[in-house]
Image (cartoon, rainbow, N blue to C red):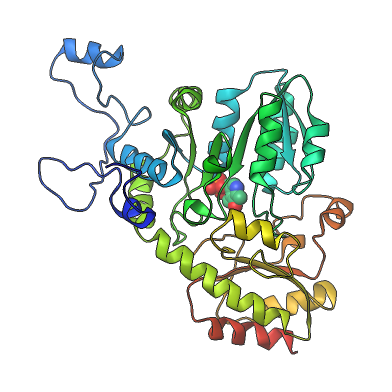
Amino acid sequence: MSESFYQPETLAVRAGAVHSQFGENSEALFLTSSFTFESAAQAAARFIGEEPGNIYSRFTNPTVTMFEERLAALEGAEQCVATASGMSAILACCMGLLKSGDHIVASRSIFGATVNLFGGILKKFGVETSFVSATDAGEWSAAVRPQTKLFFLETPSNPLTEVSDIAAIALVAKKCGAWLAVDNCFCTPILQRPLELGADIVIHSATKYLDGQGRVLGGAVLGSRKLMEGVYGFLRTAGPTMSAFNAWIFLKGLETLKIRMDAHSANALQLARWLEAQPNVGRVYYPGLPSHPQYQLAMQQQKSGGGIVSFEVKGGREAAWRVVDSTQLVSITANLGDTKTTLTHPATTTHVRITPEARAAAGITEGLLRIAVGLEAVCDIQNDLTRGLNK
Ligand SMILES: *Cc1c(COP(=O)(O)O)cnc(C)c1O
């Protein structure tokens, strides 16, 4: 399929599909660990790369390849490599592109496990990370060292929906010869395409919106063929690759990505506006609200605000927990990107492992709740929250 010719919703349904001799219309699930050869000579040719084709599902699998090509078309990337989870995508990116002695500059407002990967595990292997503000490009520039190889950010951030200026930070990265990687989990390529804004690498936790129905874990790294060669080399050898079954789930998930993202965004905007009008709610964090500090940037960089809203319940932890415990509909869970609305108290769950001082500095207060708005009727979600807010 010619990628530039078709619209995103068409690519999401069609790109990458390869059909077998049986003429199936829906993409087939190839549940096989290995592939057979017609002769010893063919096996030899496959192994030295003289003949293209599958060998073993840790290397390539036709269902996984279909998913990779579909996501690459959506992000406008030359190549995509699929991984077992979002965290293994970030790990593969670092292991494939960095070596001991290299330096990372990363936004402070990134996924907790990513902070631990950079600040803990990679540090043990001689890769150091400086954490800087998500919203101040000047801090990125000031943190650069001669050894800086990788810039890493997530926008909008979790849970406070800070918006980083991808194009501005990409310019800083280019000037010092570093690659910029953007974790595009919250927006997906339907709302934001980081490569077009100057990023070199896009990371996904496919577990979230790409699946969209909270079923399986997966991830992806996307970028130029040259960069992905190193990432693929690590994955093929070390093994955290995507299972064929999960790839098949994600292929089906991608087919509805456009309509789901549009619906998540529309529901989230409606809920955010309503929350702003509630007497027992303090600040509401949502990039689609004019009250958001980076509203202008968000509306330039993203097609819409996305599905994640955070808000401050007046009265601290007790009041926030009362809202959580009074719900009868929304799911109390830390996951996001599901058709089902999920509600999280970050200070005691996703961000409990960082010090209270660091939490306060990051703006994650005891009254803060994060809601990943699903596809239920907004009035039902409102009624569910009202019970606890008005107690
Ligand atoms: C969930 C998440 C990850 C990690 O993905 P897993 O699939 O859980 O490994 C990384 N980044 C962001 C922004 C996430 O929300």
The answer to whether one can see residue 27 in this image is yes
**Left or right side of 315 for 29:** left
Q: Position of residue 16 (x, y in %)?
A: 29, 42
Measuring 53% from the left and 60% from the top, which residue is drawn there?
303
| 295 vs 44: above or below | below
User: What residue appears at the point 81 percent right and 72 percent down from the top-left corner?
Assistant: 317
Most distant residue in the left direction: 22
Q: Quadrant of residue 142?
A: top right
Left or right of 334, for residue 313: right
Rendered view: 149 above or below 70 = above
Q: Quadrant of residue 94?
A: top right
Name which quarter of the figure residue 131 lies in. Answer: top right
Q: Quarter holding the C terminus?
A: bottom right
Measured from the top left, where is residue 347 in percent x and y?
A: 77, 61
Question: In this orientation, does residue 207 appear?
Answer: no
* Relative to 47, residue 267 above or below: below
Q: Nearer the viewer, residue 313 or 239?
A: 313
Number of numbered discs visible in the structure rendering: 0
For this view, does 71 lie left or right of residue 385?
left
In percent of width and height, residue 384 lies at: 61, 84
- Residue 75 place in picture, x, y as percent: 45, 44
* Quadrant showing the N terminus: top left
Q: Is residue 383 above or below residue 70?
A: below
At 76% from the left and 75% from the top, the residue drawn is 320
* Residue occupying the far right of the picture: 357
Q: Nearer the viewer, residue 204 or 237?
A: 204
